[in-house]
Image (cartoon, coloured by chain):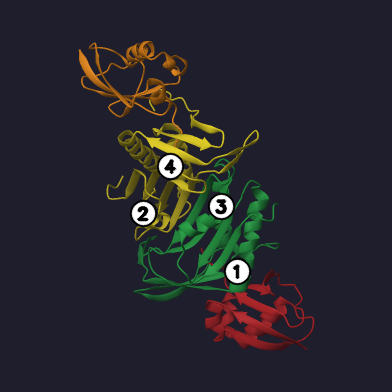
Chain colours: A red, B orange, C green, D yellow
Amino acid sequence: MNRVTILLFATLRDYVGARSLELEIPVGTTIQGLTETLVKTYPRLEKVKDSMMAAINRSYAADEQVIPENAEIAFFPPVSGG
Amino acid sequence: MNRVTILLFATLRDYVGARSLELEIPVGTTIQGLTETLVKTYPRLEKVKDSMMAAINRSYAADEQVIPENAEIAFFPPVSGG
Amino acid sequence: METNLPTIVSITADPLDLDFLLAQITLPTTGAAAMFSGMVRGVTHHSGTRQTTYLEYEAYQPMAEAVLRQIADEMRQRWADLQGIVIVQRVGRLYPQTPTILVACTAAHRHTGVFEAARYGIDRVKEIVPVWKKEVGPEGEFWIEGEHHLKSGE
Amino acid sequence: METNLPTIVSITADPLDLDFLLAQITLPTTGAAAMFSGMVRGVTHHSGTRQTTYLEYEAYQPMAEAVLRQIADEMRQRWADLQGIVIVQRVGRLYPQTPTILVACTAAHRHTGVFEAARYGIDRVKEIVPVWKKEVGPEGEFWIEGEHHLKSGE
């Protein structure tokens, strides 16, 4: 198993009810796989999962990207800075 | 006769040797006419007279414009602010 | 690309000091600066009128600063004459009429792309920097979501 | 054109205070500002390298302020969404790396022409505002002449 940190921002934090999670995931899990796992655990994510963005170790990550060991993963809605 | 004030800026002030002049000019004198009078009196203006700009009462004035009574006339080289 | 050219990127809770930041990117050879600043609107006219009491800005700070640096690099790649670049995003609780961001760039002369570069910089900030704002007003609070969905490679 | 929109034009010997000036043109409905600032170059690369010790700026002040106001009017005519406008030209003895001018304009949003308007403003300043500068350096002093010869109607 691979132990990862998951950071959540803005609306996603409200939906999950936490700023961060520590999770054990199977080696080889992709961003898409982790997203599906989270949506099962936190059903309120269902309605925003198509617009959710992900980062691995502080870089944007595509759905199919495999999560490396001990990664810092972040999920967030479309950005609105400026 | 028409009594006018003439203000001079930048290089023109150096060529004339004064910041301002008080002059009596014939009624009906144009900017071009006044320019020719000044060039006769201050020959160093000869080489810059084609690029000299003029204002009457703080507005840009064309060569053919007639100078009104008691006007404030200004002559200056192309501007270089900013 | 010269390596000693100043690039200042920051996510900060401190007020923006434009004069100070501009001085940081003014070299002996600098003659021109283009800048963009955004502010909190207290009143927004957009299909009706909305009042804003304050905005609460939040950032994924380490990633946000890395992305700001990436944007500065993109600006330098596109406008080779740029000298200094500042991109500073303020976060925290920000009230109407408060500057929230400064994007600034300098060059020897003004016809070098400084205006286009500053505009590109703020456009990219709004597209890819992980910062979010929650709007708080008389009718409650809600997160503002951006409209940009990233394409692969961004 | 609304008449209560702030327009600040000035020829001044005082240092430019960008934060203060920006605040003067930030309304409750303002969300974006584009700005241009010019500085004295201490070193100019242009067919060789020239050193500048300082510039001495001179203005035909009352006419210059009237022309600045005319330029602000032109900006408003061309970009109807502009809210506030600042055009401040500093004069006197100015040393390298000192800001000499600020052209700034605000609007509710950034896609309203603020960048184009600021650029138009500085271009017009350099064309028609009666201000001149004398450059003083190790090889003596000389007046810098603009290249723009006015066409009728300007």
Q: Earlier in the sequence, mark 1 or mark 3?
A: 1
Q: Position of residue D8 (x, y in %)?
A: 33, 47
**Which amino acid is tagged 2?**
Ile
> What residue is drawn where x is 38% and y is 38%?
D71
**Which amino acid is tagged 4?**
Arg
Q: Position of residue C48 (x, y in %)?
A: 35, 62
Please give left or right for residue D45 compared with residue C49 in the image.
right
Which residue is label 1 attached to?
C64
Q: Position of residue A68 (x, y in %)?
A: 77, 79
Q: CA distance from mark 4 to mark 1?
A: 42 Å
Q: Which is closer to the viewer, label 4 or label 2?
A: 4
Work out whether residue A32 or residue D49 is closer to the camera in this orientation and state it: D49
Q: CA distance from mark 4 to mark 2?
A: 28 Å
Image quarter of residue B64: top left
| Position of C153 relative to D64 (above/below) | below
Q: Element under label 2?
A: loop
Q: Which is closer to the viewer, label 2 or label 3?
A: 3
**Which amino acid is tagged 3?**
Cys
Q: Which is closer to the viewer, label 1 or label 3?
A: 3
Which residue is label 2 attached to?
D25
Please give left or right for residue A80 compared with residue B49 in the image.
right
| Position of D42 relative to C103 (above/below) | above
